[in-house]
Image (spheres, rainbow, N blue to C red):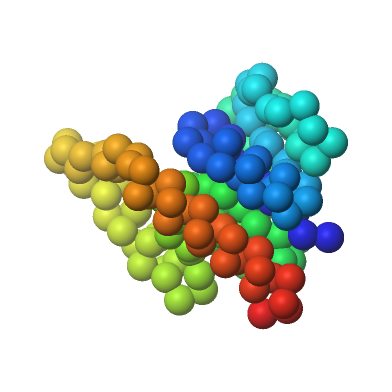
Amino acid sequence: MLKIYIDADGCSVKDEVYKVARRCKLPVVVVANQGIFTPDSPLVEAVIVGQGADVADDWIAEHIEEDDIVITADIPLADRCLKKGARALGPKGKEFTEETIGDALASRALSQQLREMGMPTGGPAPMTQKDRSRFLNKLDTIIQAIKRGQ
C-alpha cells in the first residue's frame, strides 16, 4: 500500500502532506530525531529515531518500498529511495527522478566542496506560497500517477 514518508526534521510542508493524505486516505510516516507534533489521526504514525547524522535517513531508506513517496530536501536520501523504486519530492515541489538525481548530487557535492574551501554558497531561498502550491500540485500528481500504475 502506498505510504508517504516525511523526513521531518526541518520539513516545512508537513501540514500540506497531512491535508493531502487525509483527502486521499493514505498513511503517513513522520520520521524525526526528536519528538514532533503530529495530528491525532490513525493515518499518521510518528517514528522517533536515535540521535546522529543520517539516522532518520537510514530508517526511511530501510523501510520505504516501491511506489511509496518520500518528502525530503536531502538529496542523498532521495537517491537511496529512488533506487528502491520509490518517488522523492522536495518541499518546494521539485520531484527528484532518475534523470535529475545525478545533477542534484553533483551540485550538492560542488557546494559542499566550495564551503569546505571557505567560500560562501548561500542557502535555499525562503519558502513562498507559490512553493507550497507547487508542492501540493506535484504531490497530488505523483499520488494519482502511482494509483494509475505509472
| Residue at the farthest front position | 23
The quarter of the picture where the C terminus appears is bottom right
Q: Residue at x 27, y 55 (%)?
A: 110
Name above or below for residue 90 compared with residue 96: above
Q: Which residue is drawn at 63% across and 43% down?
A: 19
Residue 76 locus on image (x, y percent): 50, 53
Indicate left or right for 79 with 113 as reference. right
Q: Can residue 58 be seen in this view?
A: no
Residue 57 locus on image (x, y percent): 61, 43
Indicate left or right for 136 with 87 as reference. left
Name above or below for residue 89 compared with residue 141: above
Observer-nearest of 7 and 127: 127
| Residue at the farthest left position | 119
Residue 127 locus on image (x, y percent): 35, 40
Q: Which residue is drawn at 64% across and 23% down?
A: 36
Total labels drawn: 0
Q: Residue at x 42, y 70 (%)?
A: 100
Name above or below for residue 90 compared with residue 35: below
The quarter of the picture where the N terminus appears is bottom right
Residue 52 locus on image (x, y percent): 59, 28
Indicate left or right for 28 with 16 as reference. right
Indicate left or right for 83 with 132 as reference. right
Q: Is residue 99 visible?
A: yes
Observer-nearest of 143 and 66: 143
